[in-house]
Image (tube, coloured by chain):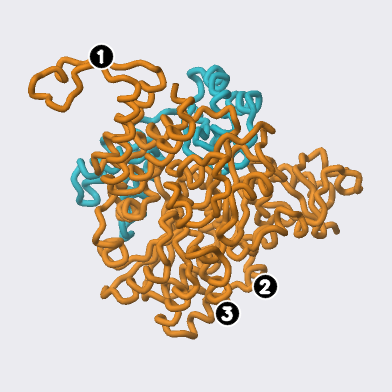
Chain colours: A cyan, B orange
């Protein structure tokens, strides 16, 4: 199936929903790994919006990316509670372990603030990470 | 067969609860997955006949079952951390299976909704006003007054929007409630819908909360029929912190950029899609079923401190020994919360500061720990309760760095709608960096032009830069459209004034 057909399918699924743009873009991001300029144009056409409006929305939210990144992604919480529990001291080891193979992303709060430092890989969350724990998580990605 | 209760809360799972549950099952036990008691330092916690053991790893299973484990904590309900609480919103925490309708009904579920439906909508609103319940999202606006505005507003279509975009670091009560007691939130929304005449509800959950989203979806599939004709839909955010601000959240729900709207018009009159809308936090809505039970409103109003009625689910987080969820009536001092309940820092070092209310909350010095937990008392001190999160820092924290982080966070998350926040945060981060470096920027060519009357003609000194930062904070505080730009000065100025040595 071409990207265009996949997007058309997603658009059809959301037909009739109130305020469909955000859920629609989320599905496109999940399905295609990004919200490309072509996808924005197609969504704009389907929802009778301008391309600028759709691009404005897609570029506003951190979860949407313009290009796909096929690398595995480890999200590390860098917010205050994890800072207080020492996440910053782990970052150099994390970067060394990740290299170019794994993408490290910052996340501002996984809501596990009493057991940090925390990280997320795919759909699994991990708590109480020390340097060794975080490195092995990154290596397993 | 031995029944072992283990939490299926995301935090317990992140600490290894799934593996532990498997190990107990393999040892021949029947494992029940329940909500979390909120004693996070003990997770994963196993409960057998009311007795608790934690934190456990799968290798501990044999010793727990043969009675030789030294990780026992005694009777969980009598544990000082639990016995010291008065749980109303979290009355089911640790006790019920989150998606069990049987457990929910057996613990008083639906009593509030059934009673509300036997009353006139006006009377339901009146009870919420009587209870003194205030919005738990941070602003502390009386929930009943908001409901009354929506009830009296003319509109064919009205909405109930649950703000579950819990983005503040150090807070997790919304997540715990959605994962541990999703039916209570749904019941609260259904009561709000009945009281205000709304036909449709949205729960806007942040995308980071995968477990909560899944639980809510499953819970709705089970009980949607019970709350008809009211319909509820779960909507997932897309990683914007500012969408926790109510008008930004409404824009996001409508499929727009999550930019803040100017108020007025109030969302209660012109909210989602221009219709009257109740926007309430998860904890506000989840407190409602209890309030609507017989005598619940008066009981709720009877506890608390000053104008802060009822209980507050306080979240102890960061570098704290006994972190977790602690629901008590308003009024408890920080000293009790941090030192007695929380047991001091996890690292064992002295407490340097606590930040109350998330990234926008002030840093509070231990000498001010007598401050009672109360909306007005905090506001008087230039601090805020916010969503009730307390993040503890030990003496290794660099408060100048924390102040700079607050500005950087605001710069990254600003929606861009108003200038004080969009530009002020960037300039603020640069300024703090400059103050901390001890350096000073050379006067640039434009500043020396004759028409630049107000620009300094000499290099600014450190004192000048500090004065400039205070001035910038004042502008952000007074002129920003929403709390993001308006409250970022709280952590910055509180750090600057109480730990000036960290800015050198």
Residue B442's tag is 1
Q: Is residue A134 visible?
A: yes
Q: CA distance from mark 3 to mark 2?
A: 19 Å
Q: Give the quadrant of the N terminus of chain A.
A: top left
Q: Residue at x 33, y 34 (%)?
A: B470
Residue B497, given in percent of the width and then of the height, sits at 44, 34
Q: Earlier in the sequence, mark 1 or mark 2?
A: 2
Q: Chain of mark 1?
A: B
The local crowd at label 1, few if under 14, some if 14 to 19, many if 20 or more residues have their Cα within 10 Å, is few
Tag 2 or tag 3, which sits nearer the N-term? 2
Residue under pointer 3: B295
Chain containing the residue with disc 3 = B
Q: Quote the CA–CA distance across marks 1 and 2.
A: 71 Å
Neighbour tally class for label 3: few under 14, some 14-19, many 20 plus, Cα within 10 Å:
few
User: What residue appears at the point 87 percent right and 43 percent down from the top-left corner?
Assistant: B69
Determine whether B473 is above or below B108 in the image. above
Residue with the mark numbered 2: B106
């Amino acid at each position: 199936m071409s990207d265009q057909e996949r997007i058309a399918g997603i658009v059809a699924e959301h037909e009739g929903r109130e305020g469909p743009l955000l859920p629609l873009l989320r599905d496109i991001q999940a399905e295609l790994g990004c919200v490309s300029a072509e996808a924005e144009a197609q969504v704009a056409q389907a929802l009778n919006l301008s391309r600028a409006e759709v691009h404005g929305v897609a570029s506003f939210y951190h979860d949407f990316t313009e290009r796909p990144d096929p690398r595995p992604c480890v999200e590390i919480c860098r917010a205050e509670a994890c800072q207080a529990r020492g996440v910053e001291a782990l970052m150099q080891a994390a970067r060394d372990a990740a290299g170019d193979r794994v993408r490290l992303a910052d996340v501002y709060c996984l809501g596990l603030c009493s057991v940090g430092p925390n990280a997320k890989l795919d759909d699994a969350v991990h708590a109480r990470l020390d340097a060794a724990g975080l490195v092995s998580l990154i290596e397993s990605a | 067969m031995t029944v072992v209760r283990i939490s299926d809360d995301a935090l317990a799972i992140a600490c290894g609860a799934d593996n532990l549950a498997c190990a107990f099952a393999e040892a021949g036990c029947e494992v029940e997955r329940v909500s979390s008691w909120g004693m996070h330092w003990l997770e994963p916690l196993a409960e057998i006949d009311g007795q608790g053991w934690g934190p456990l790893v799968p290798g501990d299973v044999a010793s727990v079952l043969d009675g030789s484990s030294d990780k026992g904590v005694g009777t969980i309900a009598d544990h000082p951390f639990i016995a010291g609480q008065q749980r109303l919103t979290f009355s089911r925490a640790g006790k019920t299976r989150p998606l069990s309708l049987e457990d929910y009904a057996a613990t008083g579920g639906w009593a509030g909704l059934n009673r509300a439906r036997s009353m006139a909508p006006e009377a339901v609103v009146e009870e919420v006003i009587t209870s003194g319940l205030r919005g738990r999202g941070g602003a502390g606006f009386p929930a009943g007054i908001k409901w009354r505005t929506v009830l009296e507003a003319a509109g064919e279509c009205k909405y109930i929007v649950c703000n579950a975009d819990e983005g503040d670091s150090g807070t997790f009560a919304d997540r715990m409630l959605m994962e541990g007691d999703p039916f209570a939130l749904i019941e609260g929304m259904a009561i709000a819908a009945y009281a205000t005449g709304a036909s449709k509800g949205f729960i806007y959950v942040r995308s980071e909360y995968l477990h909560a989203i899944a639980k809510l979806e499953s819970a709705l599939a089970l009980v949607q029929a019970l709350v008809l004709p009211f319909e509820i839909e779960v909507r997932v955010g897309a990683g914007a912190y500012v969408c926790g601000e109510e008008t930004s959240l409404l824009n996001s729900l409508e499929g727009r950029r999550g930019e803040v709207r100017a108020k007025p018009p109030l969302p209660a009159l012109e909210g989602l899609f221009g219709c009257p809308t109740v926007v309430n936090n998860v904890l506000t809505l989840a407190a409602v079923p209890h309030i609507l039970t017989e005598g619940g409103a008066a009981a709720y109003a009877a506890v608390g401190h000053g104008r802060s009625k009822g209980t507050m689910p306080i979240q102890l987080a960061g570098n704290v020994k006994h972190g977790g969820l602690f629901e008590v009536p308003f009024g408890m001092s920080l000293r009790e919360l941090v030192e007695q309940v929380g047991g001091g820092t996890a690292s064992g070092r002295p407490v340097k500061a606590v930040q109350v209310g998330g990234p926008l909350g002030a840093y509070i010095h231990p000498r001010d720990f007598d401050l009672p937990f109360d909306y007005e008392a905090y506001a008087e001190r230039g601090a805020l309760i916010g969503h009730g999160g307390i993040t503890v820092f030990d003496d290794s924290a660099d408060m100048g760095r924390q102040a700079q982080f607050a500005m950087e966070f605001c710069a990254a998350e600003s929606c861009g709608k108003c200038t004080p926040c969009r530009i002020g945060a960037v300039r603020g981060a640069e300024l703090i960096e400059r103050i901390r470096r001890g350096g000073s920027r050379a006067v640039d060519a434009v500043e020396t032009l004759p028409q630049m009357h107000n620009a300094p003609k000499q290099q600014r000194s450190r004192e000048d830069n500090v004065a400039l930062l205070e001035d910038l904070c004042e502008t952000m505080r007074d002129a920003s459209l929403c709390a993001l730009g308006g409250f970022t000065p709280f952590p910055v100025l509180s750090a600057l004034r109480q730990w000036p040595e960290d800015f050198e």
